[in-house]
Amino acid sequence: MLAFILGLAIGLSLMAGQQIIFSQRLKQLLGAFGQENLPPYLSQTSRLFMAAAQQKRRQQELQTILSSVQQLINFAPIAYLQVDRDNHLLWCNQEASRLVEIDDPSPTTPRLLLEQVRSYDLDQLIEASRKQQAIQQRQWVIHPLKADPLNPVSRKSLYLMGYAIPLSDDQVGVFLENRQEIVQLAQQRDRWVSDVAHELKTPLTSIRLVAEMIETRVDPSLKSWVQRLLGEVIHLSNLVHDLLDLSRLERRASQTLTLTSTNLPPLIHKAWSSLEPITESKNVQFSYVGPQTLELEADQTRLYRVLINLLDNAIKYSPKASAIQVRLTQLVPQDNEPPCACLEVIDTGPGFPDDEIDQVFERFYRADPSRTRPINNEASGFSSGRSLISNAPVTSSPNVPSYENPSPIGTTVNGNTTSSCGLGLAIVRQIVEAHAGSVTAQNHPETQGAWIKITLPLKPSPLVSPSEISHS
């Protein structure tokens, strides 16, 4: 009898332990379902069935939402495609199928994306997004061919902007933006500007010759008018020259370069010396930090133009008795990148408008002086140019204006009248990109002034014309 009671107690203990373990696991399962707060009067089994039913309904709702989103993406006007961890195409929408000519948008047997879209740039974009687990973007040109080895047919080149987004399970989604129309509009604009500049070049030269001829022959009381006329003609002639130069750079940048071994530090000092008349009048000091010798393969004339534009801009928009810093360093190459030189120009002026920094390298860009950050209670601005606004004339009579000291049209910044047309930094960008380099603009955290940073490879490799990349 004692053995029976002992066995029964052991059995009941084991049963109670199993029940406790079962209840804990059931509670964990309900917690995983998010249904641990179901009515306590229901049995554990009933609560489990109820949680499973609710979970099934939720899954159906999510599936409906997923189908709606997929249908929305499928009919969206922007191309989208999705690949797995091995870069097999899982599916794409109708716009992607049309844009890059994918034959099977939703393959039953996934195929490599490279078999469907012959673009290594797209593959590199996807790999960069997967590796860094961050949104990546890239701009490139694709030249599609008809997949027929016997009768290959070349199709119209496409200018694409790709945005790669990392997804779960190492999948990547890619949005492709067709920038063909933007490129064509930019090319038409550039062609129109170039044609107008060509048409203006000859008459401006004639007007300048006439103005120079009559300058010494007019009455002294009218000489100031001729000098003003001559100054404006020279200003317009410089504008036409810059437009033509910029147009040549955009069309065939790499072909216009004459690469030679160039020692950059002496070129920097030479550019600063050529601007001494301006620096002395404003008492602007020059500070150079860097090596005395750093040679790179570059077009010395074009690089000198870059330095002149940057230093001239820095001087114009810096206050009197200030300092301009130029820093030069050689970057240590990483990940098979070529060795580069990094040039920085820092001033103490008002800097760039914070919301317009991305636009300062656009041609004819001029910041709105009323929205520029003030310095010493003076509202002024720094950009690649300013609005061409003349000072109000002082009139001695209602009909005849009087100019005692005629000056070129411009905008007053830090007490100095500038006549920039918004092409200086645009030309800088084109020349730097022609050398396979890059240029960025920001405001320096210490001086609060403009901070232009240029990176140039010591030996530039051939590259596509910037007109195909920068404006696409």
Image (cartoon, helix red, strand yellow):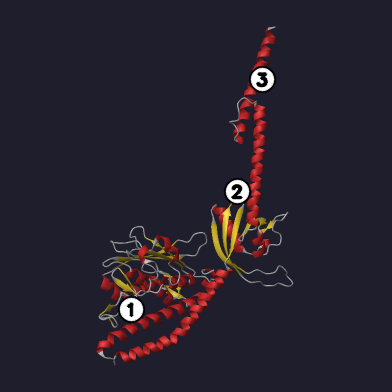
Question: What secondary structure is found at the residue carrying circle 3?
Answer: helix
First of labels 3, 2 by sequence position: 3
The residue labelled by disc 2 is: 168
Q: Which mark is residue 408?
A: 1
Helix, strand or loop at mark 1:
loop
Q: Residue at x 62, y 32 (%)?
A: 30
In the rendered image, residue 130, in percent from the top left (x then y), is placed at 58, 53
Above or below, comparing residue 63 to residue 157 in the picture:
above
**Which marked residue is nearer to the observer: mark 1 or mark 3?**
1
| Three-letter residue code for mark 1 | Pro
Picture layout, residue 272 above or below residue 169: below
Type of residue at label 2? Ser
Question: Quarter of the image holding residue 347?
Answer: bottom left
Instruction: Report whether residue 85 is seen.
Output: no
Q: Position of residue 181 (x, y in %)?
A: 57, 70
> Could you say which disc has been placed on residue 64 in the image?
none
Q: Position of residue 99 (x, y in %)?
A: 64, 64
Residue 452 or residue 187, whichever sits in front:
187
Tell me the distance, in whole angstroms, between the alpha carbons under discs 3 and 2: 43 Å
| Residue at 53% across, 53% down | 134
**Which of the two marks, 1 or 2, is nearer to us in this view?**
1
Q: What residue is pinned by disc 3?
A: 15
Of mark 1 and mark 3, the one earlier in the sequence is: 3
Q: Is residue 98 left or right of residue 321?
A: right
Q: Residues within 10 Å of mark 2 (few under 14, many from 20)?
A: few
What residue lies at 60% left-to-right and 35% top-to-bottom? 32
Front in this rendered view, residue 222 or 447: 222
Q: CA distance from mark 1 to mark 2?
A: 61 Å
Residue at disc 2, secondary structure = helix
Q: How many marks?
A: 3
Figure quadrant of the N terminus: top right
Dividing the picture into quarters, in which one does residue 144 lie? Answer: bottom right
